[in-house]
Structures are given as structure tokens and as C-alpha cells.
């Protein structure tokens, strides 16, 4: 269904959702996560037709959830939105106890890292005629940047510390991280900004006063990638290659900007099956 607008909801729901999302912004939740939490709550409010969020019961929540055939990841995300919304409601004094407190916690599934194959990565670089896309693919595939991080790259984010070039990344939740960038990629990035940038932005939107949106940059990249691969799979490529070269999960996680190495291990780094196979062959009886 289309996303219900706030104007379609009762004043009580509008005020409650606004207050909850303000709280999540203070926690520096990413803009994408803020949008997703708001969508879940608007959808529940609209479909349940319950006018007052603070009169909702545990049965109301479970009844609505059971009406849908959710995938495991989607169900976990929706439940998290409801649980945190009503936990905030208790903290804000809107109700004494949370009707979402006993909703089942759904652990995230172990991911299947799927880095783009090397030949297809090189094919995408070779065939694209858009210099923005060529550079964006390299920033994702070599450094593991997210599309929003790529879109926000600015000349001022480059610095030299005496031993090499560094790039400051504006990451999720407004968190910054600083990573090394190769001499070659730095040279190409600076040349790209000189020729195609505006006001220091590497990927300026029309008018040049701000960068392209992450969504549009991702769309441009997807046009030259194989159908089964998104821009995010370029990030899988970079992190898998970094880990396989370094065997250092802490280094790889720091490059990725992950708060936990468990995220890096579970979702981004594909095991080196050739190395694993060599060991298995060696120890085979």
C-alpha cells in the first residue's frame, strides 16, 4: 500500500508520531531509519483505525501483525518500531506500561554477503560513460562507502597527514569516520571535482548548491550494474577484499563504519572458500 500521510491520521497519532521521531533524531538515528519507523507507525495507525495510540492494547498489536504475511526481516523491523514507540510512550508519561513490551523479539537473520563478482565489477567500470557513475562505483567497490556517503563527498573532506591521503566520511547517524584513500583514487577524485564538481561537491545536484540524493545516485549506479546486484553489493566487495587481504576484522569493521564487528562478519564479509577448501584438502584423511 502507499504510505499513509500524517494528514490521514487522528491528531493524537500525529502528535505521538512526531514526538517519537523527534526522540529518535536525538539518538542520531539515520534519516532512512527515521523514515522507516515513521512509515511503520503510520501504517499501523491507518490500518488498525484506532484513534488514540495510548489506548492500544497488546491484543491490538498482535492482531494487526498477524493480519500480514511478513518476511522475517520485515517482521523484526516492524516489531522494533512498535516496541520502541511504546517504550518511548512510557518514558514520555503517556501511559504506565507498554503494550509492546511483550511482543516477541526477532533476531536478525545471518546475512549472506554477496560481493559483486570481479569480472562484472570491471565490466561496469569499463562500460559506463557517466564519469559520476564511474567514480561512485570505485568509491563503493574500493572503499566500501554507502551510496549516501558517496553522494556527500566534498573536496574539504580530503586531507594529507604526512604519510598519505585521508577521507572523512559523513556516515549513518551523523557519525564521522576517517579512512585512508589511495593516491590514485585521490588524484582521480580531485580531477573529477575540478571537471565535474560544483562548490566542492564531487556529485552535485543541478544548481550545484547541494549534492545529489543518495537515492538518485544509487539509481544511476544500478543502471550499469548486473540486474542481481545493487550499489550495496559493491560495499560487500570492498569489505570482503579488505578482510581477505588483512585477516583483520577490526580493521575491516572500522573501514565499514560499523558499531560492531558482528555486523561486519555476518552481513558483509564473504568467507574465502578457496582458502577454506585448501585447508580442508590438506587435513583430509
Image: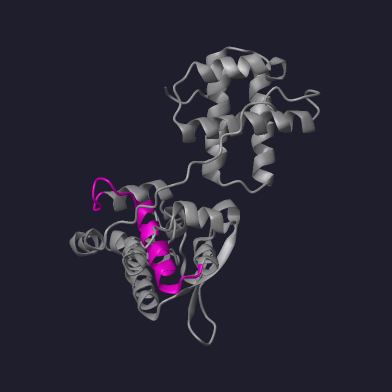
Q: Is residue 266 magenta?
A: no
Quarter occupied by residue 134: bottom left
In front: 17, or 140? Answer: 140
Q: Is residue 122 above or below residue 37?
A: below
Q: Is residue 164 above or below residue 213?
A: below
Prevailing secondary structure of the magenta residues: helix
Query: In this picture, is 94 found above or below 34?
Result: above
Point 69% across, 39% down: residue? 23
Quadrant where the image shows the N terminus: top left
The color scheme shown is one colour
Q: Does any portion of residue 90 appear in the rendered image?
A: yes
Q: Whole-percent x and y of residue 241?
A: 38, 67
The answer to which quarter of the image holds residue 139 is bottom left
Q: Give the quadrant of residue 284.
A: bottom left
Q: Of all residues shown, which one is farthest toward the bottom? A: 162
Please give the range of residues in magenta: 223-248
Residue 211 appears left or right of 285: right
> In the image, is 109 to the left or to the right of 222?
right
- Asked if residue 241 is among those painted magenta in the image, a careful observer would answer yes
For residue 37, side relative to residue 69 (left or right): right
Q: Which of these two is toward me, 108 or 143?
A: 108
Looking at this rendering, what residue extends furthest in the front direction? 285
Q: In the image, residue 95 lies at what x, y percent?
A: 78, 23
At horizontal 44% and vertical 22% (from top left) the residue drawn is: 69
Kindly tell me whether residue 46 is visible in this rendering. Answer: no
Residue 4 percent across, percent down from the top left: 50, 23
Position of residue 145 measured from the top left corner of the image (x, y, whole percent): 44, 60
The quadrant the C terminus occupies is bottom left
Work out whether residue 40 or residue 129 is closer to the camera in this orientation and state it.
Answer: 40
User: Count of labels shown?
Assistant: 0
Depth order, front residue of 166/277? 277
Amino acid at each position: 500500500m502507499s504510505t499513509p500521510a500524517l494528514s490521514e491520521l487522528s491528531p493524537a497519532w500525529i502528535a505521538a508520531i512526531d514526538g517519537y521521531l523527534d526522540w529518535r533524531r536525538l539518538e542520531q538515528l539515520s534519516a532512512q531509519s527515521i523514515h522507516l519507523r515513521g512509515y511503520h507507525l503510520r501504517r499501523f495507525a491507518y490500518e488498525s483505525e484506532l484513534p488514540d495510540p495510548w489506548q492500544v492494547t497488546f491484543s491490538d498489536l498482535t492482531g494487526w501483525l498477524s493480519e500480514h504475511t511478513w518476511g522475517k526481516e520485515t517482521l523484526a523491523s516492524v516489531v522494533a518500531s512498535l516496541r520502541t514507540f511504546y517504550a518511548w510512550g512510557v518514558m514520555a508519561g503517556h501511559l504506565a506500561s507498554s503494550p509492546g513490551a511483550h511482543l516477541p523479539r526477532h533476531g536478525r537473520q545471518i546475512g549472506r554477503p554477496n560481493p559483486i563478482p570481479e569480472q562484472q565489477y570491471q565490466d561496469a567500470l569499463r562500460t559506463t560513460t557517466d564519469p559520476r557513475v564511474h567514480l561512485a562505483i570505485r568509491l563503493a567497490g574500493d572503499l566500501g562507502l554507502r551510496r549516501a556517503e558517496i553522494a556527500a563527498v566534498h573536496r574539504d573532506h580530503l586531507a594529507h597527514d604526512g604519510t598519505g591521503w585521508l577521507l572523512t566520511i559523513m556516515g549513518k547517524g551523523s557519525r564521522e569516520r576517517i579512512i585512508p584513500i589511495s593516491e590514485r583514487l585521490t588524484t582521480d577524485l580531485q580531477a573529477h571535482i575540478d571537471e565535474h564538481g560544483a562548490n566542492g561537491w564531487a556529485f552535485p545536484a543541478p544548481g550545484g548548491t547541494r549534492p545529489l540524493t543518495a537515492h538518485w545516485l544509487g539509481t544511476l549506479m544500478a543502471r550499469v550494474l548486473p540486474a542481481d546486484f545493487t550499489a550495496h553489493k559493491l560495499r560487500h566487495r570492498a569489505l570482503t577484499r579488505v578482510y581477505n587481504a588483512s585477516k583483520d576484522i577490526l580493521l575491516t569493521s572500522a573501514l565499514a563504519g560499523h558499531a560492531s564487528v558482528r555486523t561486519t562478519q555476518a552481513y558483509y564479509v564473504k568467507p574465502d572458500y578457496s582458502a577454506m577448501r585448501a585447508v580442508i584438502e590438506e587435513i583430509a584423511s
